[in-house]
Amino acid sequence: MSQEFDHVPVAELEALIKRLPTVLRSHVAVNEWGAIEEIHVLTTLDRSPKQIVRDVESALLAQWGLRVDHKKVSVAQIMDDRATRPLARLTVVEFRIDLDTVHQNAQGYVRLQPADDTTTDFEGRWHGRYVPSQYHNIMAWATVDAVNQIPELAQPVVLTELRTFQMAGRTIVAVALSYVTNKRKEEVLIGAAPERGDGQGAAVRAVLDAVNRRLGQIERPVPKKVLGSSEELDERKDEE
């Protein structure tokens, strides 16, 4: 079958490749006999170079029976100025409350990370009095302070209420947060979490329970970077 389609016009090859998901531009170089020497593809960052190369190989094989060595396919990725994606959920990396018995002070500390980016930390701190009944509030405010480090938030999140109650024999911490959107509309975010014997961890989780439901509705720009080429794929295969 491949012999039948040895001389597919370059324009048709490029047109097919351009129809693949996330592809912006394509250029196919052939030799004097019409055989494919190089394929250059420009895409957005939504899919990996490895996926793009496989798409190109599969498309050419399915459409014309052309088998192309992946080493001939080069992929460059750029940021689409309009490209955005939802904010990822936040996960807890660390939390603690430090007690100063001399000055009767307590400080809560929380470190959060986006679920899709372990290289980014959001840290929050909050000071309060050395009073055990206030420890949940201190940790909740420290978590809110960490959340407010997210640059895409329209306005800071505010803790408006915290309550504890018993349910099914367990202590539950519930919080109400206030968040004002870009359209200046106030939203009330509600979250709750049971205590797990880890001190004030329930307050941290309750805040995240409320916030994480809203983060998926907030868009952030795709980071600016250039990724991938067929050479990188070769290096990965060598490492494997």
Image (spheres, helix red, strand yellow):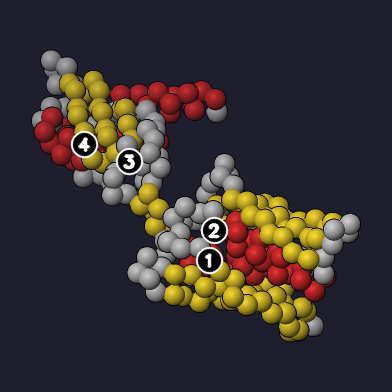
**In the image, residue 190 lies at what x, y percent?**
56, 76
Estimate how packed mark 1 is, as few (under 14), some (14 to 19) or many (20 or more) residues with alpha carbons within 10 Å.
many
Q: Report the residue that reaches farthest toward the front.
A: 103
**In the image, residue 58 lies at what x, y percent?**
30, 39
| Distance CA(mark 1)–CA(mark 2) | 6 Å
Picture layout, residue 140 above or below residue 15: below
Estimate how packed mark 3 is, as few (under 14), some (14 to 19) or many (20 or more) residues with alpha carbons within 10 Å.
some
Which marked residue is nearer to the observer: mark 4 or mark 1?
A: 1
Residues at circles 1 and 2 in contact by the CB criterion of under 8 Å: yes
Question: What residue type is disc 4 on?
Answer: Arg
Q: Indicate which disc, 4 or 3, sits on the residue closer to the N terminus.
A: 4
Question: Would residue 175 appear left or right of 23 to someone viewing this image?
Answer: right
Of helix, strand and loop, which one carries label 1? Answer: loop
- Report which quarter residue 50 is drawn in: top left
Question: What residue type is disc 1 on?
Answer: Val
The image's mark for residue 148 is 2
Which marked residue is nearer to the observer: mark 3 or mark 1?
A: 1
| Distance CA(mark 4)–CA(mark 3) | 13 Å
Q: Residue at x 51, y 23 (%)?
A: 238
Q: Indicate which disc, 1 or 2, sits on the residue closer to the N terminus.
A: 2
Estimate how packed mark 2 is, as few (under 14), some (14 to 19) or many (20 or more) residues with alpha carbons within 10 Å.
some
| Distance CA(mark 3)–CA(mark 1) | 30 Å
Q: Which residue is drawn at 37% across and 33% down?
A: 226
Q: Name the residue under label 4.
A: 25
